[in-house]
Image: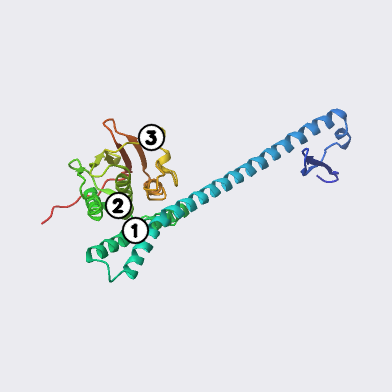
Amino acid sequence: MPGAEAIYFPLSNKETVLGVLVLLPVNLRRVFLPEQQKLLETFLGQIAQAITRVRLTEQARKAQVEMEAERLRNSLLSSISHDLRTPLATIVGSASALVEEDNTLKAENKLELSRAIYDEAQRMSSLVNNILDMARLDAGAVELNKQWYPLEEIIGAVLTLLQKRLEGRLVTVKLPPGIPMIYVDAVMIEQVLINLLENVLRYTPERSPVEIMAESSSSAVEISVADRGPGIPEGCENKLFEKFYRVRHEAAQSGVGLGLTICRAIIEAHGGSIQAQNRPTGGAVFSFIIPLDHAPPVMGEEE
């Protein structure tokens, strides 16, 4: 406004100056009237309070993020130090026995020590892979290679990979006739099923049965892994999918508590959801839904 004289008012709370309000009055004399001064003071106070609230909210958010990051770091370090120390001790002890007592050990003892080294190395590899997978998923660095796959093909590949570990358990696969193909990253969905089955192996009695089931609708396919174990403690159904959360913390339970978190991240990346609940007849069931955004291709008749 030409010829207008600016008036500067400090914006402050009880602790510090927040800024300056610049006013270009139409009538300079009216600004200094008592009622106008009172109105300006009210406006200045309201603006200062709003700015203070915004700043406090941002500080609280940053503090919460920092606390969560620190909690995750502490949980990760605690889990890694515990779960990697155990297999490392076995590997070092078995390797030391093989090196130092090679001439006195019987063949069956050597074989037993070699198997212990192999099994614990596999366990360490699984732990490290879970940590790396979670880091990639958190960073959004994983690109899905989605294609159409028959569900029975994915389940068959998983059961083949876990064949040795599932020995002694009755594994029942229930797929309804005519179940449609699913549009997924097969490697990722296989990892979900592997993690769920490893969870069954870890927390249920040996030789207890496990069931893999599926149901379909016009819009989705639901896949479930059910066991006959002790079930899920009440109130823990959702916590199971949090990072580093484990129902049991005994030394006998391996893993850093990332398997189910990885499952959730993979399923959500596919646009689906995953949940856990207890079975009415005993045990737990983990179910995930893969949406059918469009119809699968029609397969032609084989010649």
Element carrying mark 3: loop
**Quadrant of the frame with the N terminus:** top right
* Residue in the image at 36% along x and 59% along y: 90
Q: In this orientation, which residue lies closer to the viewer: 289 or 157?
A: 157
* Residue in the image at 85% along x and 34% along y: 31
In the displayed orientation, state which residue is furthest to the left.
Answer: 303
**Quadrant of the frame with the C terminus:** bottom left
Q: In this orientation, which residue lies closer to the viewer: 287 or 301?
A: 287
Q: Is residue 23 visible?
A: no
In the displayed orientation, state which residue is furthest to the top.
Answer: 35
Q: How is the image coloured?
A: rainbow
Residue 233's disc is 3
Q: Amino acid at mark 1?
A: Glu
Element carrying mark 2: helix
Tag 1 residue: 120
Q: Position of residue 37 (x, y in %)?
A: 84, 32
Side of 170 relative to 240 (left or right): left
Above or below, 238 against 147 in this view is above
Q: Position of residue 211 (x, y in %)?
A: 23, 41
In the displayed orientation, state which residue is furthest to the front.
Answer: 104
Residue 190's disc is 2
* Residue in the image at 30% along x and 41% along y: 220
Q: Amino acid at mark 3?
A: Pro
Give the foreground label among 3 and 1: 1
Q: CA distance from mark 2 to mark 1?
A: 23 Å
- Badge 1: residue crowd in 10 Å (few <14, some 14–19, many ≥20): some
Q: Position of residue 242 (x, y in %)?
A: 44, 43
Element carrying mark 1: helix
